[in-house]
Image (tube, rainbow, N blue to C red):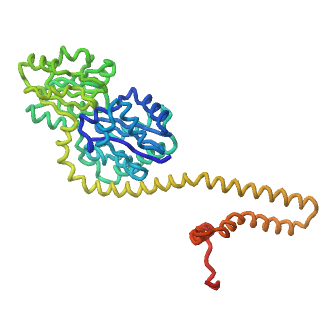
Amino acid sequence: MALFTLGINHHTAPLAVREQVAFHAEKLQQALADLTRANSVREAAILSTCNRTELYFATDNPDAAAAWLADYHRISRHEIDPYLYTFPEREAIRHAFRVASGLDSMVIGEPQILGQMKDAVRVAEEAGTLGTTLHKLFQRSFAVAKEVRTTTAIGANIVSMAAAGVHLAERIFERLSDQKILFIGAGEMIELCATHFAAQNPKEIVIANRTVERGSALAERFGGSAIRLDDIAGRLAEFDIVVSCTASPLPILGLGMVERAIKARRHRPIFMVDLAVPRDIEIEVGELDDVFLYTVDDLAQVVESGLESRQAAVVEAEAIITERVDGFLHWLQTRDTVPVIRSLRDSAERMRRHEMEHALKLLAKGEDPARVLDQLSHRLTNKFLHAPTQALNRADGDRGELQAVVSRLFHLHRDPHSDD
């Protein structure tokens, strides 16, 4: 079984394509079980975020995983094949290290992806699909990410999606302190966005969430309040800024709902940020004159200005990753030799026990101990060297190669006095 990464991300596909292959958190364990049960995949983990959907897996048939991905989401292969990438062993390892370190993110160096990758590992562990190879890969990925962040400036002056949202909102409104903000969802991204917006001391913060208790717990941190998702329609007109990021498979804010809110606001503008994949806000909402709607792809344009200042750090980080990839490949290769080493040691141990039993019998008969020990050493030497000697004698076209291997294995040196 070889290691592979199969995926689609913001580099290869637009949001409209990415949202078709996104996985909902509550269905990940079942998806992993389905993938490993029916597609010759021994180990697997799925990383699904607003910017990427990636399968990390061990198999002899990587194309089966691509077929499974299309079947699972009920889309045809030809629709997603142009956007998919498949990385074999070395590139798969390098990709995992780069993702964990934030080098493959829309915002270079952003730390959120590391937490999302850890969540993916936890789900795979719970699903029972995280074997020795993937477990080691992800643990090394986390270690590399820590090394990159502590030894380079990759995370310095980071411009996050949340900070980009605040920056865009300040273009629409003169003062955010005069605005009322509605956050839809209560996950990590909403918490991050609420932290950034709360720093601007808005007039009011409200969290709308399916579970009011969770929404209330988050709202209390920012001096806000919480409502149910069902209450949004009746209160949407109150808010100047709406930031949404949920795991809903269907849009939460439809065109009709937003049109009614704009009418009730007498066409005062609403600034909206949709960070969800699939989208929480219907795409048609962005066509309304008094709505400023931004998606994760739109926010990417805002954060690109900070990329140049981080390029030196990226070069340093890439060098670290290259070195750590070589180290992980060495570990994989070492694992491949373990069965051979174990078999070799088992064979030698059987020879040793057999010769020890033979020597003990001779000693019990009263044989001279020195003679028995001498015989024991000769018999062991002959048995240990029988197989390699026989292989050398029978070698044909590969004799030179075999001789070189044996010389290296046994640390042999050519006798300078021997004939050529």
Question: Who is closer to the viewer here, 13 or 27?
Answer: 13
Quarter of the image where the C terminus is located: bottom right
* Residue 177 in picture, x, y percent from top left: 13, 29
Is residue 416 placed above or below 321 in the rendered structure? Answer: below
Q: How many marks?
A: 0
The extreme left residue here reads 266
Q: Can residue 265 be seen in this view?
A: yes
Quadrant in the picture for residue 377: bottom right
Query: Which residue is pictured at 46% across the width and 53% down the height?
Result: 328
Question: Who is closer to the viewer here, 8 or 114?
Answer: 8
Question: Who is closer to the viewer here, 42 or 158?
Answer: 42
Is residue 35 placed above or below 312 in the rendered structure? Answer: above
Question: Who is closer to the viewer here, 23 or 152?
Answer: 23
Q: Is residue 119 visible?
A: no
* Residue 38 in picture, x, y percent from top left: 48, 33
126 to the left or right of 237: right
Quadrant in the picture for residue 169: top left
* Residue 390 in picture, x, y percent from top left: 69, 66
Quadrant in the picture for residue 35: top left
* Residue 313 in picture, x, y percent from top left: 28, 54
368 to the left or right of 6: right
Query: Which residue is pictured at 57% across the width and 55% down the height?
Result: 337
Query: Which residue is pictured at 23% across the width and 47% down the height?
Result: 157
